[in-house]
Amino acid sequence: MMKWVFGLMLLLSVVFGIFTGNTPGLTESALNSCVEAVELFLYLIGGMCMWGGFMRIAEKAGLTAKLAAVFRPLFVILFPGLDPKCKAYGLICMNVAANVLGLGNAATPIGLNAMHELEIEGKKASLDETIASRHMIVFIVLNTASITLIPQTAATLRLKHGSLSPFDIFPAVVVTSVIALAAGLAVALIFNAAGNRKGNR
Amino acid sequence: MNYTSYIIPVLLALIILAGFVKKVDIFNEFIDGAGESLRVGIGILPALIALMTAIGMFKASGALDAITGVIAPAAVFLGFPPEALPLALIRPISGSGALATYETILSEVSPDSFAGRVASVMMGASETTFYTVAVYYGATKVTKTRHTIAACLTSDITAFIFSALTVNLFMN
């Protein structure tokens, strides 16, 4: 996917640049943008490490596990028919808790384990393992539309560009991500229910 | 809006207190966590260089303006600032691409302007959909993803529309 995005962007810019006669601008931006990338990295890495450090303490203090316990009852609606005692269920709770705390690095390995366990649950119900199960779809929506409590990257970059209160987007981010998640889940659950009626789980 | 300035300090204090209560070696765990983030950061640097170069050239050539110009009327109709459009296009595809585009937008419009805030809310409230879908199904034998993409893109598009609506509601 990215090879096409990268390649087409470069080729299009060269063609467009020659067409509009702006080849000096092209050269200059090629030589400057890579330096800007390193500057951007330097700007972000401090905040990333700071949150990574605090979140590691939160994880070790059991805050992630506490959050996971809060989510447990909620998931009965999202994963109907999934045994709350199975391994997949516990992993899903941990994954969502890690996402909410902004622990992306911790969330992904847990999430991949959960996918594997969901596959095993599917086998138990003798489902075709090349077709995504309804639980997998809902779980992936939970991850692509994850609710983040701290918009850290956005706040850091706003501060860099002179924002007067970089965290003032906080309420808007929370409301937007909750509504976006609800919309994605609604589509997933409606299609799931429709598939159920056709006998396709 | 001043209460938002309490969130981060109080959160950090709570984490430290929880660490003390559970007898966590807070300093060494902080160092460990920060070290892991540093490795992640260094991991995305090459992609960031590649994509910022491509985006920089794309912008300099005038191609970005041309594409944005075509979609802009639809965006304006939905109350979406055209300056933030490039971010909406790249956000579901690439995390480092989105970061690079976001940085470009903030260097052009003020972070406290309408477009700057909408772009910021989008950065905070949406994810790299296609990457996540690919990685998660990569852990299984699934080849038919059924309505996964439809559901995920619904959530992305909702996030884009509501980023403009909520910024209007909360801050303008």
Image (cartoon, rainbow, N blue to C red):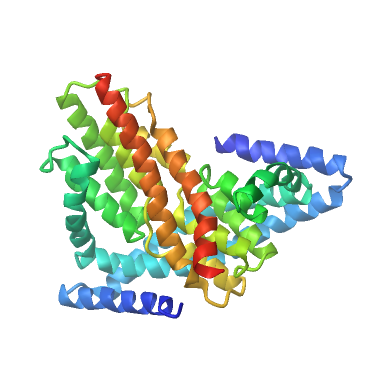
Q: Is residue B107 above or below residue A125?
A: below
Residue A177 spot, x, y in % from top left: 41, 54
How many numbered marks, from 0 up?
0
**Spot occupied by residue A132 in the image (x, y as percentages of width and height):** 32, 28
In this rendered view, identify the residue nearer to me: B147 or A132: B147
A130 with respect to B69 (left or right): left
Is residue B128 something that shows in the picture?
Answer: no
Quadrant where the N terminus of chain A is found in the figure = top right
Q: Could you tell me which residue is drawn at 34 percent across and 48 percent down?
A: A108
What residue is at 34 percent from the left and 36 percent from the top? A188
Q: Position of residue A103 (x, y in %)?
A: 34, 58
Question: Residue B161: percent from the left, percent from the top?
Answer: 52, 50
Q: Nearer the viewer, residue A140 or A51?
A: A140
Compare residues B113 and A68 and report the one nearer the observer: B113
Which corner quadrant of the image does residue B73 belong to? top right
Q: Is residue B33 above or below residue B76?
A: below
Q: Residue at x 46, y 69 (%)?
A: A47
Q: Quadrant of residue A139?
A: top left
Q: Residue at position x 27%, y 73% from top?
A: B15
Specify the quadrant that holds the C terminus of chain A: top left
